[in-house]
Amino acid sequence: MADAERTYTAEHVIAAAPWDVFELLVDAEHQGQWRDRWETHAPVVSDRAYTHVRFEDGLELALEPEGAGTLLTATRTRTGEGLTGRIGLLFQSRSRVESEMEAQLKRIGASVEFGAI
């Protein structure tokens, strides 16, 4: 039986420049400023300077210039292994997962915009 897979996406425009956002994201010490206190910190697995950051927990962030700020796009793919995992993906609310990701993007924006770096 093949594994099921779902991809979730959220976007948010941040008033800070891409290089400021990138510096916040790749600095492990700053994760506590934008990660929810109940969410675990995850090390950066890969990055492309000022355009892309991927974390160990599967969160991928793309940074694109947007006017004077940055369009931040979050993507997360979840895989359901076996029958139970596939059923779990079916019952997981797309809107809930994507709204949580958007809230995380807003926390990133607040961290950068209010001088957290």
Image: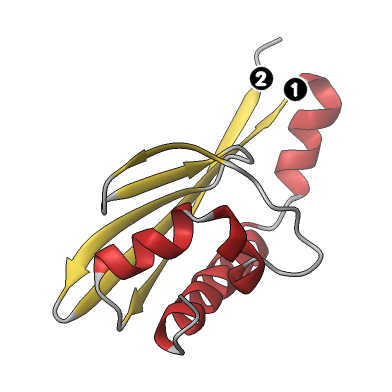
Q: Residue at x 79, y 30 (%)?
A: 85
Residue that appears at 36% across and 67% down: 21
Helix, strand or loop at label 1? It is loop
Which percent across, then down, holds residue 70? 27, 71
Q: Are marks 1 and 2 in contact (CB under 8 Å)?
A: yes
Q: Which x, y percent locates residue 43?
A: 60, 42
Specify the quadrant of the image occupied by residue 47: top left
Q: Seen from this angle, which residue lies furthest top?
A: 1
One can see residue 62 in this view: yes
x and y percent of residue 86 in the render? 74, 30
According to the picture, the residue beneath numbered tag 2 turns out to be: 3
> Which residue occupies 46% across, 90% down?
114
- Mark 2 element type: loop
Q: Give the residue pinned by disc 1.
A: 81
Q: Left or right: 94 with respect to 111?
A: right
- Mark 2 nearby-residue class (10 Å; few <14, some 14–19, many ≥20): few
Residue 30 left/right relative to 87: left
Query: Residue at horizontal 54%, vertical 47%?
Result: 59
